[in-house]
Every structure is written in structure tokens, then in C-alpha cells.
């Protein structure tokens, strides 16, 4: 009966395709939503059967960003009562309001339209509209660096106005107001509760940041029972959104990376590695070097990668663990998986080394203790990586760490954050020295079972470390657990592929540089691995607790692409020089390649 009446009304009124206003919208609740909530729209005249489409059209207000005008969001709704519509708040709906890559809390202000598909004979839909809608949308997760920057800028903006902001159970209020300051001249008083800043509902310190380069900012405070709008002079504060600085940061980052590489000891290491690589590949006749290049390289890598059945079982176990993590499963508990996995393999390595007396031809307690101490020293950079992960994201959950990174290499922690870059590269370098005695594999005598046991335990531990490093600094699987099965399988395969790239890279470095015993390299590990890792941790702590560091965090996103591009160019240049040298007469490689 209702459909017939709607059809008759539409025909009598000559409705257009845009619909006829037959619905009254009264209330939208709750005014603050997040993923998993239910947005309810109460009104009158709702049809019973047809599904509804809800459209939001207006502006989005975010901390530290210009007002996003022309924001339009559409969602589906269903009727749950004679006067109630319900919109499920999905992650896609939240991202439409808050943004995707740099999601932050958004206050929507604008119009709401609800439309129902009309009966086929009516030729028009039935709609209802309401203006003046205010909706506060909270994203699933805001990047930790973004929150750090905004919190520091919020406190700096309060100091710029001549006041301070204090958190309490009711939100934010103004603390002491300096006489003659910008806040005092605008009429703000101590104890005023901050409600809004330039259209954004203020819930925390990170929301108290005006749009970039604003001259006057509208602050709404509560003094007594009524809200009080106040215009404050914000000219000269000039907060610049990190996104606006990305191109300049990329150029500066490329220049700094080139300068650091040319002027650091790492440049000599590259030249030494290049020379050793060519020496290794020059085993074949130089006229046949180009054709033999792939075969010689594969044979060298095959000698460095263990091929026993026990190693294959370790690879299978690590693969299964990584796949489970990528599907959102937990091995023990989400917060301890990434710590328990390498700790268990490290304990097995230490126990094996002690049980076999160091892995030499004869059992020796002294040799075992020396080797265990050297192995523990090699773990310092990896421990600092775990510390930085916990400090940066506030969690050691694999899902949280992967969500904090993007799918592209320049969005990984290794490229996006200097502290992670230093400690991560040192942790990778610590995988190169071997835990077993190097003299045991010279071919002068048969390999004993003790030596094989140490080799297996060390390979298993390195496999676990590589797996955890892939999750923490190499982007992990890059796919949320809620994705489709095919997408999750693709992400798991990508994560396993990254682990093998690391293992093959370590094997190649070992083959080029030769067998290096951890006991003989303790001093080198201390100077070139442990101390830089500590410096990287200190750099991250400094950046997270100083004003200059907060500014750098805001533009650090632009350094990632520059560093990735620079590293790719360096590897490509070294490979090209090696191939060219093999195909021509010997060249003098003592001069640095970048000069």
C-alpha cells in the first residue's frame, strides 16, 4: 500500500530523477564514530523494504591541514525500525572521511541526504535532507610519527598564543594565560575548556594545531553554560603540513645521503666489496667471464647456504610461522611473538655451543664461553631494533608494526626513519659472521658432528632474526588480516620472499668476503655494529623528545624515496662496473667508485 501511495504522489507532483522530498530527518547519533560503530539516523516517512543510500556532502577539518572542501562520502543503510536507519561504520567509510596513508581524526561539517529507491513505476526516488550535520570520525590508527609531530605542534601553538593546554577528564582546558599575550588579547581566560579549533572538535593535544599558514584561527571555548567563539591571532605560527614538505625533503635527503656515503667509512667498504666481488668472479677465463658470471655466482651462493634436511625443516617452520602471522594469527601472544621466536633460537644456539664445547674438533669449555660471548655481542644491533620498534609504535605486535609501514620500500621503517636504518643495517651485518669455527670449513679435514650442530643452530637463529627483521623494518606482508584470501596469500608469499632475499644477500656477502669467525671479529662488531646501533637509538630518542626532532619527523617521509633511489643507483652502478671490468682488461679499483 505504501509503494502505491508513493508512486501516486510522485506521478501527481511530476517528480524528477533527483527524487521528491517525502522524508523528514531529525537526528544523527552518535556524533563521534569509529570502525565498528553503528550510525543511527532517525526520521519520519521511511519506506520499509527498499535499501537506503546515505550521502554526506560538506567539508572535512583535520589538525594541521587546510580545510578539505567538497568532501563527499556515500554509504549504504538499512531500516531497523519505523523511524530509524542504521549505517554500519566500516573501515572503508572511515578512510573516506579521515584519509588513508596519513589518516587523522576528522570533523565533518555539512549536509546529509538519505534516498530510497522508488518503485519502478514512480520513476523517482524518495529523499530526505538535513543541513548542519557535525560528525567526528576517528581512524583505526594514526601513524605514530604523525601523532608525535601534532602533539608537539599543539603544545607549541599554545605557547605561541601565550597559554598552555592541560588535559583532564573532560578534555582540554587552558592553563595559565600570559598577560598581554595573543590569547589574553583575544579574550581567552584560564580555565576555558577548548571545544573546537577551526571547525575541528578538539579531543586531545594533537588536535590543537591550526591549518598551515593561518592568519586568524577560530577557537570555540566553553565558559559557563554556553560555547564562546573567539578569533585568535595565529599569524607567524606557520605550521606546514608534512605532505607539503615531501618534495623538498626528498631532494635534501638525496643530497645528504650522497654526502654521507662519500664521506663515511661506508664508502671504503663499498669499494672493498666491489674489488672482492670481481676477484671472486674472475676465477673463470676473462674472455668467458660474461657467460660464466651467473654460474660462478650460483655455485658460490650454494656453498654458503646450508642444504641439510634439518635446515630444510627449520626453513619450513619459519615459513609456517610467518604465514600464520600474516594471517593475523598468533604463535604465543601478539605482544611476545617477535621476541619469543628469536630468543628461543638464540637459547638453542647457546645451549648447542656449550654442549659441543664451542664446535671445534675437541670439546673445550673456554672455547665455548668465548664463542657464546661473541654470539651475544652480535645480537646487540637486533636488540636495539626491537627496542626502537617498541618505542616507535608502542607495541611489539606484528600486526601493529606492519600496519605502521606502507607496502612500498620507501615506506618501510628501514628507509623512513634514520634510527631504524642504522640499527637495521647493523643487524643485517651481524648475520654475516659465522658462529661455527671458520677453520672447520677450509676443507683441510672432515667436518665433525659438533661443527654441524653449531652450524644448524646458527642457521636456525639467523632465519628467525631475518623473519623478525622483515616484519619490523621491511614492511612485513603489507596486507591487513581482513583482506581477501588471495590477497593474504600474496602478502604471505611476499614476506617469505623478503626473508629469502635477506638470506641470499647474507650468503653472497659471505662468499665475497670469505669465512669470518665471530670470535675473531668481536672488536669489529663492537666498533662497526654495536656502537652505530646505539647511536641510531640515541638519534631516535633525540628526535622523539626535542622540538627540532619533531620538525624532522614531520618531513622524514620525503627521505624514504630518496634513500631507496640512491641505494638502487649504488647497487646498479657497482654491478655495471663489475660486469664491465670482467669483460675488459683489469682496471685499478682502488679509486672510489662514486668519484
Image (spheres, rainbow, N blue to C red):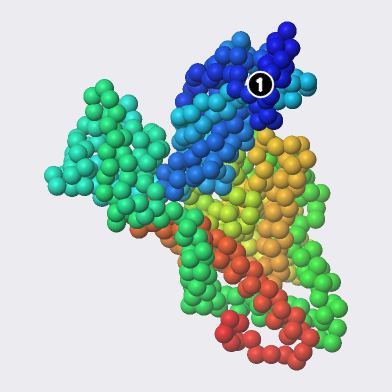
**Which residue occupies the foreground of this view, 74 or 104?**
74
**Which residue occupies the foreground of this view, 264 or 52?**
52
Residue 444 location in percent, x, y?
A: 76, 70
Residue displayed at 82% across by 82% down: 289
**Which residue occupies the foreground of this view, 305 or 108?**
108
How many numbered marks are there? 1
Q: Quadrant of residue 375?
A: bottom right
Residue 192 location in percent, x, y?
A: 24, 32
Q: Is residue 27 left or right of residue 364?
A: left
Residue displayed at 67% across by 68% down: 509
Visible in this render: residue 553?
no
Is 529 drawn above or below residue 235 in the view shown? below
Indicate the secondary structure of the residue bearing disc 1: helix
Q: Residue furthest bottom?
A: 585
Residue displayed at 62% across by 42% down: 341
Which residue position holds label 1?
A: 13
Visible in this render: residue 70?
yes
Q: Quadrant of the N terminus?
A: top right
**Which residue occupies the foreground of this view, 258 or 129?**
129
Residue 126 location in percent, x, y?
A: 65, 22
Is 438 drawn above or below residue 17 in the view shown? below
Amino acid at each position: 500500500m505504501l509503494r502505491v501511495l508513493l508512486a501516486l504522489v510522485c506521478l501527481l507532483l511530476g517528480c524528477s530523477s533527483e527524487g521528491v522530498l517525502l522524508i523528514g530527518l531529525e537526528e544523527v547519533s552518535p556524533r563521534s564514530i569509529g570502525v565498528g560503530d553503528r550510525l543511527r539516523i532517525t526520521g519520519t516517512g521511511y519506506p520499509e523494504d527498499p535499501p537506503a543510500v546515505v550521502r554526506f556532502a560538506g567539508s572535512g577539518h583535520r589538525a594541521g591541514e587546510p580545510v578539505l572542501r567538497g568532501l563527499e562520502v556515500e554509504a549504504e543503510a538499512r531500516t531497523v525500525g519505523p523511524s530509524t536507519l542504521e549505517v554500519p561504520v566500516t573501515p572503508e567509510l572511515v578512510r573516506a572521511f579521515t584519509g588513508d596513508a596519513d589518516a587523522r581524526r576528522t570533523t565533518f561539517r555539512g549536509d546529509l541526504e538519505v534516498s530510497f529507491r522508488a518503485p519502478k513505476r514512480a520513476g523517482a526516488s524518495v529523499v530526505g535532507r538535513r543541513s548542519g550535520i557535525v560528525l567526528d570520525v576517528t581512524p583505526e590508527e594514526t601513524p605514530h610519527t604523525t601523532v608525535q609531530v601534532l602533539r608537539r605542534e599543539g603544545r607549541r601553538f599554545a605557547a605561541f598564543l601565550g597559554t598552555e593546554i592541560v588535559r583532564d577528564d573532560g578534555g582540554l582546558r587552558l592553563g595559565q594565560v600570559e598577560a598581554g599575550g595573543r590569547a589574553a588579547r583575544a579574550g581567552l581566560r584560564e580555565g576555558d575548556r577548548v571545544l573546537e579549533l577551526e571547525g575541528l572538535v578538539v579531543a586531545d593535544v594533537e588536535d590543537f594545531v591550526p591549518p598551515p599558514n593561518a592568519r586568524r584561527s577560530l577557537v570555540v571555548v566553553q565558559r559557563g553554560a554556553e560555547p564562546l567563539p573567539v578569533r585568535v591571532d595565529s599569524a607567524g605560527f606557520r605550521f606546514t603540513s608534512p605532505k607539503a614538505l615531501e618534495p623538498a625533503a626528498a631532494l635534501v635527503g638525496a643530497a645528504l645521503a650522497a654526502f654521507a656515503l662519500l664521506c663515511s667509512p661506508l664508502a671504503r667498504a663499498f669499494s672493498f666489496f666491489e674489488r672482492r666481488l670481481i676477484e671472486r668472479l674472475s676465477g673463470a677465463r676473462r674472455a668467458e667471464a660474461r657467460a660464466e658470471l651467473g654460474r660462478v655466482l650460483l655455485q658460490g651462493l650454494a656453498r654458503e647456504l646450508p642444504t641439510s634436511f634439518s635446515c630444510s625443516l627449520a626453513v619450513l617452520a619459519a615459513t609456517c610461522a610467518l604465514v600464520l602471522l600474516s594471517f593475523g594469527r598468533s604463535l604465543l601472544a601478539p605482544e611476545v611473538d617477535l621476541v619469543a621466536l628469536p630468543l628461543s633460537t638464540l637459547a638453542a644456539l647457546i645451549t648447542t655451543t656449550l654442549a659441543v664445547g664451542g664446535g671445534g674438533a675437541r670439546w673445550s669449555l673456554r672455547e665455548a664461553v668465548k664463542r657464546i660471548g661473541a654470539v651475544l655481542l652480535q645480537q646487540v644491533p637486533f636488540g636495539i631494533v626491537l627496542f626502537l620498534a617498541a618505542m616507535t609504535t608502542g607495541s611489539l605486535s606484528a600486526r601493529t608494526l606492519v600496519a605502521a609501514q606502507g607496502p612500498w620500500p620507501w615506506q618501510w621503517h628501514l628507509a623512513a626513519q634514520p634510527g631504524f636504518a642504522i640499527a637495521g643495517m647493523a643487524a643485517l651485518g651481524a648475520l654475516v659472521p659465522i658462529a661455527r669455527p671458520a677453520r672447520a670449513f677450509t676443507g683441510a679435514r672432515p667436518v665433525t658432528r659438533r661443527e654441524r650442530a653449531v652450524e644448524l643452530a646458527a642457521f636456525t637463529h639467523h632465519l628467525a632474526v631475518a623473519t623478525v627483521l622483515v616484519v619490523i623494518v621491511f614492511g612485513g606482508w603489507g596486507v591487513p588480516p581482513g583482506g581477501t584470501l588471495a590477497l593474504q596469500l600474496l602478502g604471505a608469499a611476499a614476506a617469505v620472499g623478503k626473508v629469502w632475499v635477506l638470506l641470499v644477500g647474507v650468503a653472497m656477502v659471505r662468499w665475497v668476503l670469505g669465512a669470518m669467525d665471530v670470535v675473531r671479529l668481536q672488536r669489529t662488531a663492537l666498533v662497526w655494529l654495536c656502537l652505530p646501533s646505539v647511536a641510531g637509538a640515541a638519534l631516535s630518542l633525540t628526535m622523539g623528545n626535542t622540538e627540532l626532532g619533531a620538525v624532522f619527523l614531520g618531513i622524514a617521509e620525503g627521505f624514504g624515496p630518496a634513500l631507496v633511489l640512491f641505494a638502487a643507483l649504488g647497487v646498479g652502478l657497482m654491478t655495471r662496473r663489475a660486469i664491465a671490468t670482467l669483460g675488459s682488461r683489469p682496471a685499478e679499483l682502488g679509486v672510489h667508485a662514486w668519484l
